[in-house]
Image (cartoon, rainbow, N blue to C red):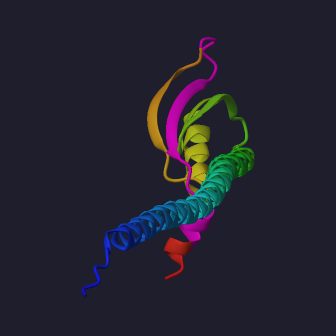
């Protein structure tokens, strides 16, 4: 006697279980892949947001630094302009002192009988037109000018009769010397 066992339904059931198990694993892997993809995407989104925050902070900081640099540049320009104005003021003060010294020297040097008609200054060069009663007064005036420490040796340019014929009109140029420089040159 022989017993025949039909394993076909069992095999069919086994195959169906394996197929369901395979599909379940495929679906689980697919879900796991989607979840991992979402997690990676979320991770990169967080990294991107953090980097954007850092970039925004750096941009903001750069903007503040540029504003500070512009402020410093403005202050530097203002300081430079003030320095130039200070130099101009110092030059004007020195010129004022030179002019006061020039008038003091001229007033000190006037010889008896000499009248200054015109005095003009261009740089350190002073041009003078004066009237004297005699040649002796002209010579005396030129000697007095040459003897002053703030003025150089006069350069006599012309002498002629006064319009009224009573006096002599004479012209000369003289260099105004800075007294500090004159004493420095004479000191060594």
Q: Residue at x 59, y 18 (%)?
A: 162
User: Bounds of the magenta span?
Assistant: 163-183
Q: Answer whether residue 148 is visible to the viewer in this image.
A: no
Q: Answer whether residue 139 is visible to the viewer in this image.
A: yes
The residue lying toward the viewer, choosing from 181 and 132, is 181
Instruction: Give the image location of residue 163, x and y in percent.
Output: 60, 12
Number of numbered discs overlaid on the protein picture: 0
The residue lying toward the viewer, choosing from 174 and 25, is 25
Instruction: Give the image location of residue 113, x and y in percent.
Output: 72, 35
Question: In the image, is 24 to the left or to the right of 136?
Answer: left
Outermost residue toward the top? 163
Instruction: Give the image location of residue 101, x and y in percent.
Output: 71, 51
Q: Is residue 3 rendered magenta in the image?
A: no
The residue lying toward the viewer, choosing from 157 and 92, is 92
Quadrant position of the N terminus in the picture: bottom left
- In this view, 161 is above or below 109: above
- In this view, 30 is above or below 168: below
Q: Residue at x 54, y 80 (%)?
A: 187
Outermost residue toward the bottom? 1
Q: Residue at x 55, y 60 (%)?
A: 38
Instruction: Give the image location of residue 115, x and y in percent.
Output: 70, 31
Q: Is residue 178 rendered magenta in the image?
A: yes
Q: Residue at x 62, y 39 (%)?
A: 137
- In this view, 119 is above or below 48: above
The residue lying toward the viewer, choosing from 86 and 136, is 86
Q: Quadrant of residue 22?
A: bottom left
Question: In the image, is 28 to the left or to the right of 11?
Answer: right
Outermost residue toward the left? 2
């Amino acid at each position: 006697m022989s017993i025949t066992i039909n394993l076909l339904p069992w095999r069919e059931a086994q195959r169906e279980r394996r197929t369901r198990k395979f599909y379940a694993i495929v679906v689980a892997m697919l879900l796991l892949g989607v979840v991992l993809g979402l997690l990676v995407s979320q991770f990169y989104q967080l990294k991107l947001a953090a980097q954007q925050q850092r970039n925004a902070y750096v941009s903001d900081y750069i903007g503040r630094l540029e504003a500070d640099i512009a402020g410093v540049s403005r202050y530097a320009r203002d300081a430079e302009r003030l320095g130039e104005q200070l130099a101009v003021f110092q030059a004007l003060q020195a010129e004022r002192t030179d002019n006061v010294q020039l008038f003091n020297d001229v007033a000190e040097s006037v010889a008896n009988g000499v009248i200054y008609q015109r005095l003009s200054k261009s740089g350190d060069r002073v041009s003078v037109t004066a009237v004297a009663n005699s040649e002796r007064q002209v010579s005396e005036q030129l000697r007095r000018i040459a003897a002053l420490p703030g003025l150089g040796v006069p350069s006599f340019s012309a002498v002629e009769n006064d319009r009224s014929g009573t006096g002599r009109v004479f012209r000369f140029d003289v260099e105004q010397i800075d007294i500090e420089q004159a004493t420095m040159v004479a000191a060594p």
